[in-house]
Image (tube, rainbow, N blue to C red):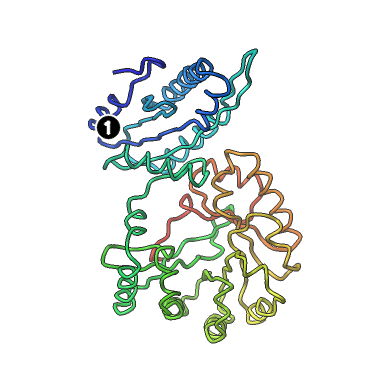
Amino acid sequence: MRDTLTDLPNIEQLHIDLDKAKHPKLFVLDIDNFREINIQYTDSVGNFILQEFAKALQEFAAMHKMSCYRIGADEFALLQNIPFDLDVMEKILSELCKFISNQHYSNDSFCLDINAHIGICLDHFHPLKKALAALELAKKQNQPFVTHSEFATNLLNETKENIYKNIQYALEEKKILPFFQPILDINHKVLYNEVLIRLEGKDGVQSPKFFLDISHERGVYETIVKSIAFAIKNIHYPKGINLSYHDFDDENLFLYLIETFKDSACVFELQNDTYLHHIANLEKINQIKANGIKICIDNIKSPKDLECFEPHQIDYVKVHGDIIRLLPLYDKEYATCKDILAYTKMLDAKSIATHINSQTCFQVAEELLFDYFQGFLFGKPTTVL
């Protein structure tokens, strides 16, 4: 069963192949603004582009031992039947994004650069439905790609009341847990372990993005933070606790954290948020430093995010994970990183590249001379140091 225009296998064939695959890894691509191309340049140009894109994508698929399909007017799919391997998936995605960025078509009447969004599903339960949902999200958020997460989808669909019940259960059963993820130098020597808050509910371990907002609304955020602080305060290894500077509006919580971690080889990782950039003065930053606690500013997207700091005022700068993930793919992110690193040196601070999940990404970060690295390539979050 094949598509008549491109001679690629069609969506019916994809369904058959998905049913047979034990370990399907599915990538769905949608060419951007294809309807406008047809309107402006006529259907014949549109058909030409589809045929040429199909040929190029089929060559890409053959190089990576994948099957290639046309599944809609301007939608294509790539299928690989292999067990999950993070490094392999990162490499394929990196190469696929590069492939898309290189698609350029022209003749005497037109000259077009083709872009596309990608939806990804890496499990075997309804992979096409999930990949298409991820594709829609990628288009809505204007992201190059989105990977479907069943666990995240289920959690997002829960009511606030159910989430709050999970928080109460975790607090009562002492299931607010510290996870640790190392930050290392180029020689794999650990600088410190970032402490990541996790909630162990009845349905499994949950990331804070699914419960911290509710904990603020219901007035139990302070209890959660103090619970984690109490659990890690006697750990003598260097450690970093992730905080929002806005949390320091609560003077009691601020003083508790200072007293708990003073002179204890601790780093306060402060989120780069709007509140941080509207502080009339930085007295609390200086108070933190005066008590022997180092400061890391997290999620930096631009040198402008660092302009409110003076030299020696902060110790570490973490570049935003979205920039790091795209480093091997786009010149813009590479240039942004270079500018952030230059400003970081002006502040006499050290740089940290986060979300290093592939060797390719690490190689580029290493080339840029980041001081430290963090990500699945060096260690996943774990309950054990």
- Say above or below: 105 vs 333: above
Residue for point 59% across, 62% down: 298
In the drawing, does residue 220 fall left or right of residue 48?
left
Q: Is residue 57 left or right of residue 300?
A: left
Report x, y in % for residue 297: 62, 65
Front residue (pair 258, 236): 258
Residue 262 is left or right of residue 135, and the answer is: right
Quadrant for the N terminus, please.
Answer: top left
Q: Residue at x 62, y 58 (%)?
A: 300
- Count neighbours of disc 1 (C-alpha within 10 A) and say few if under 14, some if 14 to 19, many if 20 or more: many
Which residue is located at x 30 percent, y 80 percent?
172
Q: How many discs mark residues in the rendered view? A: 1
Q: Tell which of 171 and 5 is nearer to you.
A: 5
- Give percent across and percent down for residue 84: 35, 41
Q: With respect to residue 118, does 281 lie above or below? A: below
Residue 385 coordinates in the image, percent (x, y): 43, 66
Determine which residue is flagged by label 1.
18
Farthest-out residue, top:
108
Secondary element under disc 1, as helix, strand or loop, is helix
Disc 1 marks which amino acid? Answer: Leu
Visible residue check, residue 247:
yes
